[in-house]
Image (tube, rainbow, N blue to C red):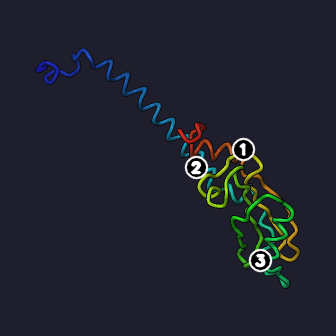
Amino acid sequence: MQSSLLNPRNWRYRKWFFQVHLYAGLGVGLLALVAGLSGAALVYSPELELAPRWGSDAVAHLMPLDELAERALRQYPGFQLEAIRFDAAGNATQVHLRKPPRGSGAAGSKAMKSRQPGTNLHLIVDPETGAALKAVDRHTGVWSFLRDLHHDLLAGKAG
């Protein structure tokens, strides 16, 4: 043992430790690169996925929020209202709808979120009429892939 402390270059396990350190560093570096690049792309996902921002001026005749929500729920039966989002002028321009998992009550829908396509919709709505101008399914497409890659490393809950 003293010989390895006095002359570490001649230690017989040095090459093995070098290989372990090299490949462990490459693996961790690759994970950090994937997480960093996918996270950087996801920062802009709301703007790119739902863009362009509909309406930047205040609307004169806003539809009341309860009517806006009812209209969105009528267009997509079986969904529940998750959120209504507003633009910079205070117009309700986004409605977030989620379909509860099968066989679960109201309490179960909060505890267990389904990641199946067609269960998580963001609607761009006209704040005057409540008409859906655009519907985006958050569980399909490239943004869903990036979310799964960044959050779970494409391994579901195990990731």
Q: Badge 3 is on which residue?
A: 65
Look at label 2 and name its amino acid: Gly
Q: Nearer the viewer, mark 2 or mark 3?
A: 3
Q: Nearer the viewer, residue 64 or 43?
A: 64
Q: Earlier in the sequence, mark 2 or mark 1?
A: 2
Look at label 1 and name its amino acid: Val
Q: Badge 2 is on which residue?
A: 39
Q: Nearer the viewer, residue 134 or 16?
A: 134
**Which label belongs to residue 142?**
1
- Say what secondary structure mark 1 lies in: helix
Look at label 3 and name its amino acid: Leu
Q: Is residue 13 found left or right of 5 in the rendered image? A: right
- Say what secondary structure mark 3 lies in: helix
Q: Position of residue 33 (x, y in %)?
A: 53, 40
- Would you identify the image quadrant in which residue 126 lies? bottom right
Cα–Cα gap, marks 2 and 1: 13 Å
Q: Position of residue 140 (x, y in %)?
A: 74, 46
The residue depicted at 53 percent of the width and 38 percent of the height is: 158
Q: Earlier in the sequence, mark 2 or mark 3?
A: 2
Label tally: 3
Cα–Cα gap, marks 1 and 3: 31 Å
